Each structure stands twice: as structure tokens, then as C-alpha cells.
Image (cartoon, rainbow, N blue to C red):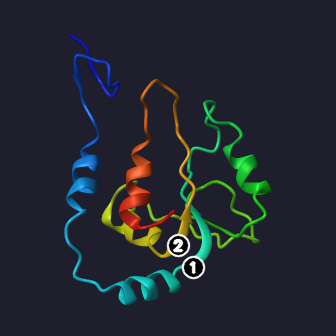
Amino acid sequence: LISSYELDSHIPILYPELKQFIKSFRPQEESMQDLIKKQERKKEHVFFAISNCQANIVPDRLEFLEKLQYPTASFGKCLGKESNLNQEWNSRAKQGSTEHILKMSNYLFAFVAENSFGMDYVSEKIYHALRAGTV
């Protein structure tokens, strides 16, 4: 028997974040007006938190962000340029933590790059961005 994230394995194991993400789709108490106001308060930057600057799997992701020609908010060790809203990422704010999701939720957009490639692989960072309400 094979157990992995691949959907064709005998026992597919999905991320624990998926369970939290699905739970978040419950009836909302907020009105449409409140949701629109919340979106209007978001910063028009691309949020990203990359600390593995030398990842061999996706070597072009930092180059892509540099060439994006759109304001970015860097919360990792990579791309610490003065032109960005560079802030040192707090070591307590691990990927998927409450602090991480709350910080990401302040931005309209999030850049989430895969750290590896594989059939059926979806980065857990996708679920984090969706939970934070970013695009």
C-alpha cells in the first residue's frame, strides 16, 4: 500500500490545513457591505514570505518577483530591498500560523510558490492564502 499526497495513491493523505480551510466555509455573519469595506482597507501589495532564497526547484521565483513591477511586501529573508515594504519576518510566524494568516489577510494579493514539483502536489500555501482572503 502507498500513502502520499498523490490522489492516485492507495491512501491519499491531504494537508491538515485543508480541513481548516473547509471548516471556514460556514455562513458568514458579515454583510456584503462589511466585506467590501474590509477588502478596500487591504494594502495593494503582493504579500510573500520566502526564506529559502536558494531553492533549486523554483530558482526563478525571486527573479519573477523582482520583475513583477508591482509593489511587494516581503516577510522572509529574500529580496530585502528598500523599494519593497521589507520587514523582517518574525520567527514565531511560521507558515500557516495564526500570525501568518492575519498578516497575509492585510494584503490584496499573495504570491505562493511551490517548493517542489510532483503529480497532484498543491502547496499548503494556497490554502493559507485562501484562508487569509487574498488572491
Q: Residue at x 28, y 55 (%)?
A: 21
Disc sitting over residue 32 in the figure: none
Is residue 49 shown left or right of residue 79? left
The mark tally for this picture is 2
Q: Dot 1: within a 10 Å radius of its alpha carbon, few (fewer than 14), some, or many (20 or more) residues?
A: some
Q: Residue 54 location in percent, x, y?
A: 65, 38
Q: Dot 2: within a 10 Å radius of its alpha carbon, few (fewer than 14), some, or many (20 or more) residues?
A: many
Which element is circle 2 on? strand
Q: Residue 105 location in percent, x, y?
A: 44, 71
Q: Is residue 80 above or below residue 51?
A: below
Looking at this view, name the residue that lies furthest to the top.
1
Amino acid type for the residue under numbered disc 2? Tyr
Which element is circle 1 on? strand
Q: Residue at x 40, y 64 (%)?
A: 100
Q: Residue 14 location in percent, x, y?
A: 27, 36
Q: In this orientation, which residue lies closer to the viewer: 60 or 23?
A: 23
Q: Residue at x 53, y 51 (%)?
A: 112
Looking at this view, name the residue that lies furthest to the front.
32
Q: Which numbered disc, 2 or 1, marks the residue that appears first in the sequence?
A: 1
Disc sitting over residue 43 in the figure: 1
Looking at the rendering, which quadrant does residue 87 occupy?
bottom right
Q: Residue at x 39, y 45 (%)?
A: 124
Residue at label 2?
Answer: 107
Is residue 30 shown left or right of residue 108? left
Dot 2 and dot 1 residues touching (CB under 8 Å): yes
Q: Is residue 24 above or below residue 31?
A: above
Quadrant in which the N terminus appears: top left
Amino acid type for the residue under numbered disc 1? Lys
